[in-house]
Amino acid sequence: MAYVTSSISKSTSEKKALLIGNNAYKRENTQLQCCINDATDLCKKLRTIQFQVTVGSDLTHEQMDRMIDDFTIKINPGDLVVFFFSGHGTQWNDQNFLMPVDNDRINERKYLKHGAINAQATLEKIMDRCPLAAIFLLDCCRKYYMRNDAAVRSLNTPSGLSSMQAVVAIAQYRVGSNVDLSQHELIDQDMEIIAKEVVIKKRCIQLWLGSNSITSDGALILADVLKNNHILEKLDLHNNRISDDGVRFLVKTLSGEQILTRAFKNQISTVLSTISNNKGDLSAKNEIMTVCSHIFTAFPNLLYLNFHQLSDRNIERLSFDCQIPMFSSTLIELHIKVQRFDDILYLLDGRFNKLCIFYVDVINIACTRTSLPIINNKVGYFTRKQQLLLIY
């Protein structure tokens, strides 16, 4: 497994490498043969191109931890860094762990946290030193089992290493920047890293997480980290798997003062929301309408609302069969899908008196309801340079 990431550019830099090879594992039947040779061979190559190389072999957990700390302290901003490990590696809870030779102390995966080296944390330590670039090379055996895994080896016991996509993607961004992690194959477990490294440590202003595999569990992790956040201005979660329950929970939670402080509420001007009704039942339709209403309560200075992407034909359409408290004196652009033409008239009865751009997808241009929503048009829309777009 190899990763290359960079942080800043510098015309001159030192080249530094830390190489570790572990062969003499203490637990029976886990000894290796070629790892030290691999580290030694790489050391010779790197020194021919003026790298300052530190080599460790057959290191215990304490020795590995100390050597990594000593190495990272010597990294200066702009240095070119290589980290290489050859030996046993495994994963637990989507974190990768590099095994020290005293692996006889680690009988269960829950002991990895304190008995092995966390690969993601090691990369973070290196990137915190702001190198010009970091080359992270992990040459680990594909299968490594704990003693207590032996009875379940035929099952889906995790082995090998998991992706470090989130850590590598985050490393390139500086404090206070806009972070785009769209289409990075991120999952819920990555949200813990996103919350810690991007929202808290890097204090990002805009965060794009679209087109990943985040569910409602990951969304809740993000909601929790936003409790005391006053910096993030934009959060994009489109095209994930948050589900109706996840979206409803997020909107309801974010509308509360205990999660979304007044300062944070007032600084959000753009909201994009996509909700589907896979069950097609009436209760879900009503809950979706409630979500729409909560948005205007949660974000009093809203300027732009895209409630469903117009290109998605399977998204639930809004229908105002009952009175919904939706009002905004700031909204200037609205994108929405509705069932009938009279739903359009309902939205244009004065509840959005600053509306300038209105994109609407309507499926039925005729009125088919016996009871209509109360429509009381009081505002002369589109008398200036306003734009109306109907798609049906």
Image: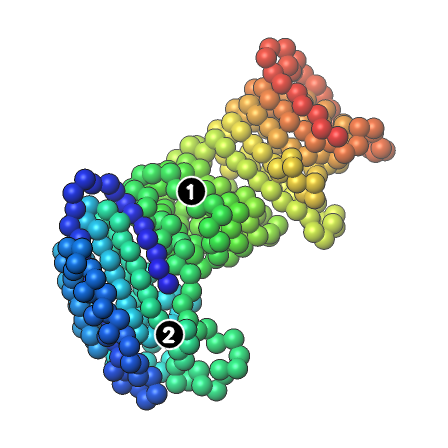
Tell me: 133 left or right of 146. left
Q: Are marks 2 and 1 in contact (CB under 8 Å)?
A: no
- Between 95 and 76, the residue placed more toward the observer is 76
Q: Position of residue 67 (x, y in %)?
A: 17, 67
Q: Earlier in the sequence, mark 2 or mark 1?
A: 2
Q: Which residue is mark 2?
A: 141
Q: Secondary structure at mark 1?
A: strand
Name the image quarter holding the C terminus. Answer: top right
Give the residue at mark 1: 180
Residue drawn at x 40%, y 54% is: 166
Task: Name the amino acid type tagged 1.
Answer: Asp
Q: Residue furthest bottom?
A: 28
In this view of the protein, can residue 68 be seen by the observer?
no
Quadrant of residue 160 within the rendered picture: bottom left
296 to the left or right of 189: right
Disc 2 residue crowd, few under 14, some 14–19, many 20+, Cα 10 Å: some
